[in-house]
Amino acid sequence: MTHSITLTKPDDWHLHFRDGAALQTVVPHTARQFSRAIVMPNLSPPVTNVDAALAYRHRILSALNAESRFDPLMTLYLTDDMDPNEINKAKASGHIPAAKLYPAGATTNSAHGVTNIKNVYGILERMQTMGMVLCVHGEVTATDIDIFDREAAFIDQVLSPLLQDFPKLKVVFEHITTTQAAQFVASGPAQLAATITPQHLLYNRNEIFRGGIRPHFYCLPILKREPHRLSLLNAAASGSGKFFLGTDSAPHTSERKETSCGCAGCYSGFHALELYATAFESVGKLHQLEGFASFFGADFYGLPRNKETITLLNQSLQIPDSFAYLEDELIPLASGETLNWSLQSPNPL
Ligand code: NCD
Ligand code: ZN
């Protein structure tokens, strides 16, 4: 019986911090678990230029103690009319390793996203030259495509041609949810990798409707059928450097989740590692967790691996029912449930 596992401190290669007072709640949670995080730019208005990204980074750091070594890695939100010179400026800043492609209308605050991939070909050309990573929300938005098929359609309609047109552009296919995506990435070129969330490793789509409609399990891309979940677990725990950790932790107030037209997003920033450990343990692959959580993302981004370590104890963690958040509540993924792993505390922030 394992009683603890010590890992190189992991990084989160995709999450949402929001802005303003929200940062006080969510940034310390993530900094406890992770050394670095790729911070999504889908604020309102979106983070579309370097000055806005660096100012946002500063606000994130202000939510932490001065001695914190947490490093927020910023992203630019691609728009149809972005100036390619912004890419050079981003690279030169040293704090913006990636830009994010949201197909317009795909998810929360994506209305300003790209309406046709060809509109940003000039930007992608520049990113390829400058060695900047492209993070993609991989779903088509056409309303005649079923919500469960949007990721698979994206592979055929957008991602395949994109990789052919930009063979040196590094692309992260984010929060993959299907067997098709896992296979496409595993057999794809070295320029392509994927992140996988805890909710897609732990739950299938039944969870959204178990005993009634459960909005805290609604995220985008939406949870899929069980065979897809098993494919993702297999990919995440395969030891392949093409799959790495990205929580897609996406906080919303309970008021905005529990309503007639609720927001998409699961909050896992507080307990991500415990959730991932639970998923890996379920298939007897805890020994593969460190590569997925702490090595492969850094390697893909060409960044150094972290030096600090964290320890997960084989000790139960009761996930809180809620956190105080923006004069409302934030309900974490699997709130109230008990996991068999807990991050040793206190940890250096
Ligand atoms: C994210 C959000 O709320 O910003 N929601 C989600 O369900 N994942 C947006 C996103 O990453 O799609
Ligand atoms: Zn996201």
Image (cartoon, rainbow, N blue to C red):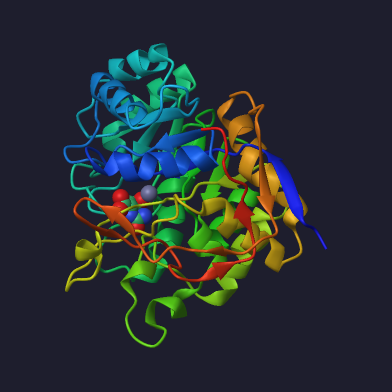
Is residue 45 among what the camera can see? yes
**Relative vertical location of residue 60 with respect to residue 258 in this rendering, above or below:** above
Q: Quarter-wise, where is residue 99 in the image?
A: top left
- 139 relative to 327 in the view: left or right: right
Q: Position of residue 279 (x, y in %)?
A: 63, 63
Q: Position of residue 234 (x, y in %)?
A: 68, 61
**Relative vertical location of residue 52 with respect to residue 19 in this rendering, above or below:** above
Residue furthest right as drawn? 1
- 217 relative to 3 in the view: left or right: left
Residue at image point 56% right, 46% down: 245
- 128 relative to 119 in the view: left or right: right
Residue at image point 65% right, 28% down: 305
Residue at image point 64% right, 57% down: 277
- Along the viewing direction, whichever of 274 and 206 lies nearer the viewer: 274
**Relative vertical location of residue 288 with respect to residue 112 in this rendering, above or below:** below
Residue at image point 31% right, 71% down: 215
Q: Position of residue 116 (x, y in %)?
A: 26, 43
Q: Quarter-wise, where is residue 303 in the image?
A: top right
Is residue 107 among what the camera can see? no
